[in-house]
């Protein structure tokens, strides 16, 4: 492809998408301003904060530093795709990572959250039973300015515990009961 | 919100095609590999190309192999995450694997490439800023201005070489395989650099780095990389120390090399290190004494400038600390060295 404008063929959250965009647009701009997928956040917009994290062929990348036309034909997962993928796979409700973030109160303003959850999802897809250190390393590229990270790590720990059948460490302030259970 | 300036993008699928595109377009064309260095710089309008040639679709530039001569050959578009995780690299070139593992954060290592890191643009706190920020200061030597804000009256740009993998590759005696419109050449990395922060490398326009070659390492090869940075999760180096330490079967030091980066426009090889360590055992009291002597000479030879974040006097005080730690890590087959 060559030119100031082009038609891209992307696979976004399992759907084949054809979208026209200027060549100098980033993947983040295409997601937000062409496709209306505003769950990927425009934070620092220069690769520091991780708020724009999406999964490219299952790996977390920064969509603010990815030229959209260089990912032609590749599979992109945004935060909007987690729940449908979970349901399509036979699950109920939100993705377990999203559910755990909700139950652990792992957010305040929520701006970093979509990137955090996608980094966590990619880690658990690669390694269902990571160590605390691996969790921290996997989330190192996602900055949160509100929470101090503790509840974010606890949420990932809870998601791991439930997926592996381990008992999560009890926390005095949180409910480890799944949503909707009595 | 930081918008990219307008440009066209070409996505060639072979090295030859990419070189032809660059040669035809002239200096208004730039190359993008992983995009993690170029795109922020373009958003800051450090360059305003008419054409950006992406190497993302060139499969021949990806991969890690051992060539017929026993050298480790790493394609320029191999990602830093792949380099850091490669068993071949970890065993044959531990300093390189460690340096790659400490570049930026996880997403950036998944995107960023070895070639891109070796060719990383120099950095300075007066240049890596938005156009508006820079314009308020009347710009600087590196781009659009005539004044250096680091060295008063300075006529030569001193922006810092900030590529973690380059010093590690220098200790390993690496060679860059370059390909341009006039053919191919092998460029030893040691002689690749120029002491000019504006453009610190001997790489012509329309010349592409295709492969990095690391010659075979000895059985007793040891290496480590140490990196001082503001936040361990993401930042560029405030100081980077690469160490090579080869020992014989009796654990006596046969070769040693230390290269320090983030001081000036090019990585700096420490002098008089081999004579302090050659023939000594790689552990014990004698080694520890020599370690202090090496740390002391490193402190004398390294003079960080106030060009990147972090107080430069503190960075200077950290030179002997990080040289000592990284050398010890190499001797103990440990590393990478970083703050917790």
Image (tube, coloured by chain):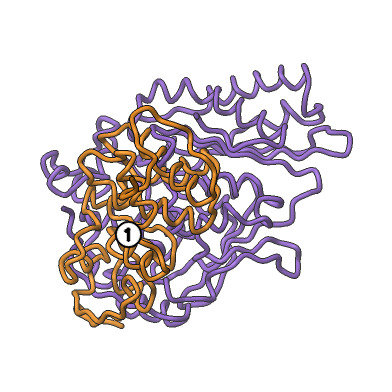
Q: Nearer the viewer, residue B98 or A152?
A: A152
Q: Residue B9: give x, y in percent of width and height.
A: 28, 75
Chain displayed in orange: A
Name the residue rendered at 77%, 31% in the picture.
Answer: B278
Name the residue rendered at 37%, 79% in the picture.
Answer: A73
To which residue does mark 1 refer? Answer: A93
Q: Nearer the viewer, residue B271 or A12?
A: A12
The shade of chain B is purple
Q: Residue B226: give x, y in percent of width and height.
A: 55, 35
Q: Secondary structure at mark 1?
A: loop
Count of marks, rendered view? 1
In the displayed structure, B2 sits above or below B227; it is: below
Report the chain holding disc 1.
A
Viewer can see residue B31: no
Q: Quadrant of residue B262?
A: top left
Name the residue rendered at 17%, 59% in the picture.
Answer: B3
Q: Residue A126: give x, y in percent of width and height.
A: 52, 58
In the displayed structure, A161 sits above or below B183; it is: above
Left or right of B160, for residue A4:
left
Left or right of A133, for residue B153:
left
Would you call the spot at circle 1 few (<14 residues within 10 Å), some (14-19), or many (20 or more)? few
Viewer can see residue A61: yes
Q: Quadrant of residue A55?
A: bottom left
């Amino acid at each position: 492809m060559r030119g100031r404008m082009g038609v891209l063929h992307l696979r976004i959250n399992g759907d084949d998408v054809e979208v026209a965009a200027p060549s100098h647009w980033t993947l983040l701009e295409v997601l937000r301003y062409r496709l209306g997928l505003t769950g990927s956040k425009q934070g620092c917009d220069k690769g520091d904060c991780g708020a724009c994290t999406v999964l490219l062929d299952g790996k977390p990348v920064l969509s603010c530093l990815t030229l959209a036309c260089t990912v032609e034909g590749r599979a992109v997962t945004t935060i909007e795709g987690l729940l449908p993928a979970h349901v399509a796979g036979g699950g109920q409700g939100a993705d377990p990572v999203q559910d755990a973030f909700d139950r652990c109160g792992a957010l305040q303003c929520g701006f970093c959250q979509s990137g955090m959850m996608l980094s966590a999802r990619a880690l658990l897809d690669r390694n269902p039973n990571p160590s605390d250190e691996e969790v921290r390393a996997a989330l190192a590229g996602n900055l949160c300015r509100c929470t101090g990270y503790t509840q974010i790590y606890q949420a990932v720990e809870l998601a791991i515990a439930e997926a592996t059948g381990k008992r999560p460490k009890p926390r005095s302030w949180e409910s480890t009961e799944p949503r909707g259970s009595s | 919100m930081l918008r990219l300036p307008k440009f066209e993008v070409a996505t060639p699928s072979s090295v030859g095609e990419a070189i032809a595109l660059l040669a035809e377009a002239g200096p208004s064309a730039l190359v993008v590999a992983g995009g993690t260095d170029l795109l922020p710089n373009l958003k800051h309008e450090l360059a305003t190309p008419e054409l950006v040639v992406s190497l993302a679709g060139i499969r021949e530039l990806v991969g890690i192999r051992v060539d017929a001569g026993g050298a480790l050959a790493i394609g320029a578009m191999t990602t830093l995450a792949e380099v850091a995780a490669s068993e071949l690299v970890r065993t044959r070139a531990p300093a390189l694997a460690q340096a790659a593992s400490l570049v930026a954060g996880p997403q950036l290592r998944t995107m960023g490439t070895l070639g891109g890191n070796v060719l990383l643009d120099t950095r300075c706190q007066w240049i890596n800023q938005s156009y508006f920020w820079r314009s308020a200061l009347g710009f600087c030597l590196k781009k659009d201005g005539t004044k250096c804000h680091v060295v008063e009256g300075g006529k030569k740009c001193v922006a810092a070489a900030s590529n973690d993998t380059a010093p590690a590759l220098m200790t390993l005696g690496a060679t860059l395989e370059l390909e341009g419109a006039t053919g191919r050449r092998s460029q030893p990395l040691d002689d690749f650099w120029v002491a000019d922060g504006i453009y610190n490398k001997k790489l012509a326009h329309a010349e592409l780095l295709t492969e990095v070659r690391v010659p075979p390492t000895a059985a007793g090869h040891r290496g480590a990389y140490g990196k001082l940075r503001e936040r361990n999760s993401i930042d560029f180096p405030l100081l980077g120390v690469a160490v090579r330490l080869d020992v014989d079967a009796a654990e006596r030091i046969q070769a040693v090399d230390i290269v320090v980066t983030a001081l000036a426009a090019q990585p700096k090889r420490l002098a008089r290190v081999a004579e302090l360590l050659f023939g000594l055992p790689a552990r014990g009291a004698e080694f520890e004494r020599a370690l202090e002597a090496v740390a002391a000479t490193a402190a004398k030879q390294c003079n960080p400038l106030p060009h990147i974040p972090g107080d430069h006097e503190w960075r200077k005080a950290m030179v002997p600390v990080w040289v000592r730690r990284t050398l010890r890590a190499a001797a103990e087959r440990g590393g990478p060295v970083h703050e917790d």
